[in-house]
Each structure stands twice: as C-alpha cells, then as structure tokens.
Image (tube, rainbow, N blue to C red):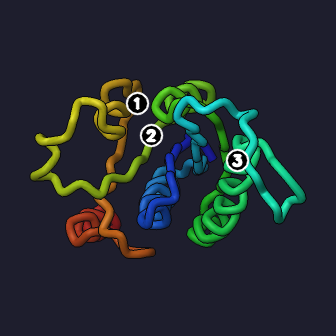
Amino acid sequence: MSGTVLVAVDFATYAEEVGLAAARLAHRVGARLVVMHVVDLGGLPDRVSVAMPELGGPAPIGEIVTEEARLRMAPLRERLEAEGVEVQLALRRGNVVDQVWSCAHELHVDYVVIGSDVPSGLRRLLPAGSFTEAILRKATCPVVVVRATGEKGTLSPGRQQVRAEADG
C-alpha cells in the first residue's frame, strides 16, 4: 500500500458520508486512510474544569471533549474499514485548519478530503473565514470537497454519477 488519504471529520450529520467518500478514494488509489478529528475549544484552556457528577466531581473540559471524540471515532473507523481500506485515527487539539495541515505534512498525505454542506450557489456568500475556504487556501496537495447530502452512507447524485463513471 502506498500513499495516504487524510479525511477531516467533525461529527456533523454527514461525517460518515464524507468518510465513505474518502474510503472509496483511498481504495481506488491504493492508499491508507487517516481519519482525523480536531478538538477545538475555541481558546478555552484545556484545564478549565466543569462539574461532572457522573464522574464524581469536576473534570478538565479538554479531557472530556477529547474522550468523547475518541469514543465517536471508533464506530466510524469500523464502518470505513468495512470498505476494505486500512484506517488510522488521528485526534488532535487546537485550531482545526492548522492541525489538518500539520497532520497532512507530517504524514506526507496525497489527498485531503473534507465535507461541505453548503450548496455551491451559496459559496460566494461565505465569509472569508469559512473552514472550507481556509483549508483550500493553505492546500499543498489536492483537496477533495465532498458536498454532503446529510444522509448516512450516501453521496449527492452528482457524486454518485462521478463515482460510477470512475468505476465504469
């Protein structure tokens, strides 16, 4: 196996859909798939504690959010491995865009896959700080933007057609 595809997921309703698109790309090009999630506390220090009666008292918010992300990544990994690709998980803390490109550089990835639920006609109205635009501006390798439909395990009709033509 040669090459690496990195997919950044944020556990929005379309995370599985974007992951499946990345798995299909990885399978097609014979690459491993790295599924990445970035915990971004928005400037809140990791050590800030919150009341967690079920844990017996206060717990650091950074640890709570990171553990929740770890738990949510496991079933996604299993689902994507069922597509026949090697899957590695990457969980980081910090600014999402910076962490995506830091990971991409460290792993020497061939493709980055991200999801977008914004209809193409609205893209021109997005503020300059949108996640998709920020990822594209820093790109040092090909970036695949998957327009999500919000339905698990499906791709938008246009993506299905492209996939069928590529497979055909």
Q: Amino acid at mark 1?
A: Cys
Discs 1/3, front? 3
How far is the residue under mark 2 from the one under mark 1?
6 Å
Q: Position of residue 44 (x, y in %)?
A: 60, 32
Q: Position of residue 141 (x, y in %)?
A: 40, 30
Identify residue for label 3.
66
**Mark closer to the chain start, 2 or 3:** 3
- The reply to whether the C-beta atoms of the residues labelled 2 and 1 are less than 8 Å apart is yes
Number of residues whose C-alpha sits closer than 10 Å to that of mark 3, classed few (under 14), some (14–19) or many (20 or more): some
- Residue 141, which numbered label? 1
Q: Residue at x 59, y 50 (%)?
A: 35
How far is the residue under mark 2 from the one under mark 3?
25 Å
Number of residues whose C-alpha sits closer than 10 Å to that of mark 1, classed few (under 14), some (14–19) or many (20 or more): some
Q: Position of residue 93 (x, y in %)?
A: 64, 35
Identify residue for label 2.
111
Q: Amino acid at mark 2?
A: Tyr
Q: Is 89 situated above or below 43?
A: below
Q: Residue at x 60, y 42 (%)?
A: 39
**Mark closer to the chain start, 2 or 1:** 2
Q: Which secondary structure, mark 1? A: loop
Q: Position of residue 88 (x, y in %)?
A: 68, 50
